[in-house]
Amino acid sequence: MVVEGWLVRAATARPDRVAIETPEGSWSYAELLALAHAGAGELAARGARPGERVAIALPPGLAFAQALHACLLMGAVAMPVDVRATAGERARLVRGARLLIDEPLGTGPPGASTGELGRVHDLDATAVVLHTSGTTSEPRPVGLTYGNFLWSALGSAVALGQDSGERWLCTLPLSHVGGLSILMRSCISATTAIVHERFETDRVLHSLRGGNVTLVSLVATTLARLLDAGLTEPSSLRCALTGGGPVPSVLLERAREARVPVSLTYGLTEACSQVSSTPLAAIAEQIPGAAGPPLFCTRVRIAPDGEILVRGPTVAAGAQAADGWLHTGDIGGLRRDGRLQVDGRKAETIVTGGENVSPAEVEAVLEAHPQVLEAAVLGCADPDWGEAVTAFVVARDGAAPEEGELRAHCAQTLAPYKVPKRVLVTPGPLPRTPSGKLLRRGLR
């Protein structure tokens, strides 16, 4: 199925509407379209072609938005890359990309052939490739189509409502589906995305208090920091969509007392962000651990082993198992009231501050240290991070590595959120199964 191009449609219907607003400046939809055309011309001149991947390693902001929409206009597949990744991580992430954009595109006039680009989108075509960490150390690419994003936007709008004056504040990385979806939804509906390069408590607090923000996406850690900083009763905020991991009941109660409306959400990259979210009408009866009913376009069922399975037009085609369902690797259940209860992760992936961390990747780095014999990494419950990356190491004979030294060693190779918050040196050996596999639950 072919639909009208989102950016072209938004720029025609609401040319003066602010498309993207950042602390450094803002662009209207007319301006964004013109700049995206200029960017598309540059990409084409550099060899990009429809259907090919273009890696975007730019911080969240205006330049990222231009590069993203330049790709979508010309039919190239945008592949955002986390700018916090180390050089080695980035090299793995950009494999298969025709181009790597790590500097802002030019703002000159578009090429002669770009004027008609982006008039339509094929809903079956891949729009974006995002990487997600599974249970191995290698990030896995997930291709999301225009149709996935369109249905996700519609499902979100039904659950959370939508106003023509929507102003959605993004404090999440744009290399993750939770952040990128804000830009995509806003373009689909011709509303405003407010983008901050990173979460800074004072800056976000200022926006919520006086920036006419109607929606904001958070994780438990950032919600807690805002409440600690004194956020109370933000006048224009309809909803603080909060997910990316467990949200403690104490934190929900604090938000309720501060009159901050929180909608718990559960989602994943393979389902193009939200699977279930608490509708605005039900926020007052928020239930810890229950992320609301599935989106209207999404089906959820629970496998016999308790795994959450997802199906529907938001699910990436390549993520479906042979039975036609997305096997999430998460454990939960459906309550009598229809809400999805999420109890934990079937896999051992750590979710810390909304970020996924593979224990095996961190263990490999620790075991590369000359004083470490073996290492085990797991997520420990933490009021700030949801789960804190915690490492248990066994030292080599005669060695006595210090915690600070091991954390510094990890920081040389790993992105900051993957560096263990705590490193505990313990007498060996580490617990293992009869077959020799590490038994992490023996360390809890």
Image (cartoon, grey):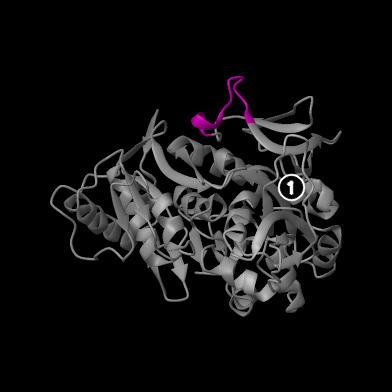
Q: Is residue 137 left or right of residue 47?
A: right
Where disc 1 sits, the SS reads loop
Q: Residue at x 61, y 63 (%)?
A: 417
Residue 396 picture location, percent across and down: 68, 62
Residue type for callout 1: Thr
Residue holding disc 1: 278
Main structural element of the magenta stretch: helix, strand or loop?
A: loop
Residue 270 picture location, percent across and down: 56, 39
Q: Residue at x 73, y 79 (%)?
A: 229
Name the residue furthest front. Answer: 398
Residue 385 picture location, percent across and down: 72, 63
The quarter holding residue 235 reads bottom right
Q: Residue at x 59, y 72 (%)?
A: 408
Q: Pick the residue in front: 159 or 361.
A: 361
Q: Is residue 338 visible?
A: no
Residue 362 lies in the magenta stretch: no
Q: Is residue 433 left or right of residue 34?
A: right
Name the residue furthest left. Answer: 112
Magenta span of residues: 316-326
Which quarter of the rendering shows the N terminus? top left
Decide: is 221 above or below 71. Answer: below
Q: Residue at x 47, y 75 (%)?
A: 23
